[in-house]
Image (cartoon, helix red, strand yellow):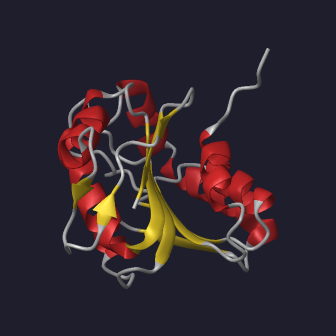
């Protein structure tokens, strides 16, 4: 029986040969993925973005997060942030945490800065689409954008399919070509190489 590949395995497969990759994880929760990534790649600099707020899903429907997860994120926001801090403590020189909304955080980064962005925040179509469009310019032309829960949440799947489609498409500048979805694995990761 083959071992399940988790989201951190999928990400690490893409960055393992980059000596000092720079990445952003949007939607950190308790830092499980962050901790694994930082442990797997000793050269990784990881920016961790999450609101860690009781208002994380205020005004959003069940397509953003199911009710049990909504409570877990909102009611336990303080404990979740503490847990994330504890998880990355051994890697604190390579982990930078931002407690803010994804779109707001994206404005802090220059274009063509990141080797990857991993999006696992609100799962509503509008939010996923806005996250993808905000973070795409921040990724180097040889980098990756990855979304969790593709094929599992309608909003994630719809936004990814609408933006990337099934064929190579142009995004923004004429020289920037995005390959079609490169992988969909058993942890519901959609991987797009720029």
How many numbered circles are shown? 0
Locate residue 99: give its quadrant.
Answer: bottom left
Locate residue 2: give its quadrant.
Answer: top right
Q: Is residue 125 above or below residue 84?
A: above
Whether residue 101 sits left or right of residue 31 in the image: it is left
Residue 112: x and y, percent?
A: 40, 80
In the picture, the quarter occupied by the C terminus is bottom left
Locate residue 68: give its quadrant.
Answer: top left
On the question of residue 49 being in view, the answer is: no
Residue 84: x and y, percent?
A: 64, 57
Residue for point 58% across, 50% down:
80
Whether residue 138 sits left or right of residue 174 in the image: it is right
On the question of residue 156 being in view, the answer is: yes
Residue for point 76% across, 67% down:
89
Choose between 76 and 155: the one closer to the eye. 155
Residue for point 28% across, 50% down:
168
Q: Is residue 177 above or below residue 54?
A: below
Whether residue 78 sits left or right of residue 134 in the image: it is right
Choose between 121 and 79: the one closer to the eye. 121
Choose between 49 and 186: the one closer to the eye. 186
Residue 139: x and y, percent?
A: 41, 71
Residue 98: x and y, percent?
A: 48, 71
Residue for point 34% across, 45% down:
180
Choose between 63 and 143: the one closer to the eye. 143
In the picture, the quarter occupied by the N terminus is top right
């Amino acid at each position: 029986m083959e071992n399940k590949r988790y989201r951190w395995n999928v990400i690490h497969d893409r960055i393992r040969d980059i000596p000092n990759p720079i990445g952003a994880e949007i939607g950190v929760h308790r830092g499980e993925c962050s901790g694994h990534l930082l442990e797997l790649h000793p050269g990784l600099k990881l920016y961790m973005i999450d609101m860690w707020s009781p208002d994380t899903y205020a005004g959003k429907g069940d397509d953003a997060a199911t009710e049990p997860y909504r409570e877990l994120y909102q009611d336990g926001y303080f404990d979740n942030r503490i847990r994330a801090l504890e998880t990355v403590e051994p890697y604190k020189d390579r982990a930078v945490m931002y407690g803010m909304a994804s779109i707001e955080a994206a404005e802090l980064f220059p274009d063509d800065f990141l080797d990857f962005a991993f999006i696992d925040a609100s799962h509503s179509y509008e939010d996923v689409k806005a996250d993808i469009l905000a973070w795409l310019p921040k990724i180097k032309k040889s980098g990756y954008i990855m979304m969790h829960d593709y094929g599992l949440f309608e909003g994630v799947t719809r936004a990814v399919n609408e933006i990337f489609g099934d064929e190579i498409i142009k995004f923004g500048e004429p020289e920037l070509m995005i390959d079609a979805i490169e992988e969909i694995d058993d942890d519901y990761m959609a991987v797009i190489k720029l």
